[in-house]
Amino acid sequence: MKITPIKTRVFEESEDLVLFILKYVKKIPEGSVLVVTSKIVALSEGRTFSDMSVLAKEKLIKAESDFAIKTKLTWLTIKDGMVMASAGIDESNAKGKLILLPKDSFRTAEQIRFELCKYFKIKNLGIIIADSGLLPLRNGVIGIAQGYAGFNGVRSYKGKKDIFGRKFIYSSTNIVDSLATGATLCMGEGNEQQPLALIIDAPVIFTNKIDKKELRINSKEDIFYPLFKNLLNDKKR
């Protein structure tokens, strides 16, 4: 597998996203995965907020979250079935504004895929809308997929055997977030100006229809549930 980050100029708010991609991506081989940072998707949709005051930001975070609680450094939130900081609202590289997450990353990923498949005359193409995320008790950000299209996001090993013949009961691999992490590592988090990355020979199964809920699990079945169940229960009261 090969990941190639793509350097671009600064993306402007309300700019046409597909035309921007085509300006810098001149060729996409059959069976590739294109990663697009969620920030430029949000900018293309005008998903920005100008009021940078603390109170306005807190109000916005709560409005964008299904669950929100203040922590020492930031807000711990749940949005669209994912635990994240501050509902994904970001100030970095934002030109004095707050940038929200895209409205519907799955839908945008499918639209980008459709346009690029038609333009490059290919059938198998994956699209990932990627953002930065955190892991409990781990320092530093990783990549996560806000939305994706064109391939299965999870590979299940349930019922298959390990090298000693023991069958897996629950095990599965999170393909899409793993690819998002690899791409995020290559694209960078600072002033690299690499909001796109092309992945060649990714170990994915391409499909025209995905299950948007294949990554989600019930909070009570999450391995981290004992750590945050009291927070969730208190919030419901």
Image (cartoon, rainbow, N blue to C red):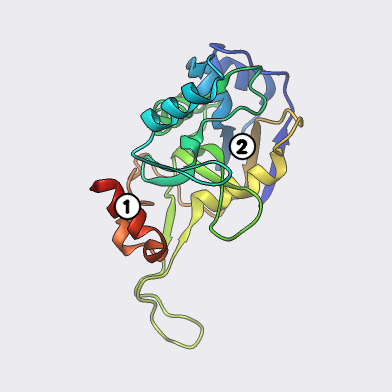
Q: Closest to the observer: 129 or 95?
A: 95
Let me know if residue 119 appears in the view: no
**Residue holding disc 1:** 232
> How crowded is the residue under tag 2: few (<14 C-alpha within 10 Å), some, or many (20+)?
some
Mark 2 lies on a secondary structure that is: loop
In the rendering, which numbered label is found on residue 169? none
State which quadrant residue 132 falls in.
Answer: top right
Q: CA distance from mark 1 to mark 2?
A: 45 Å
> How crowded is the residue under tag 1: few (<14 C-alpha within 10 Å), some, or many (20+)?
some
Horizontal arrangement in the rendering, residue 62 relative to residue 218 (left or right): right
**Residue holding disc 2:** 29
Q: Closest to the observer: 68 or 7?
A: 68
For image coordinates 35% across by 51% down, the residue present is: 216
Q: Given the image, on which type of amino acid does mark 2 rest?
A: Pro
Horizontal arrangement in the rendering, residue 115 relative to residue 94 (left or right): left
Let me know if residue 49 appears in the view: yes
Query: Residue 72 appears at what percent x and percent y?
Result: 56, 46
Query: Residue 127 appears at what percent x and percent y?
Result: 51, 36
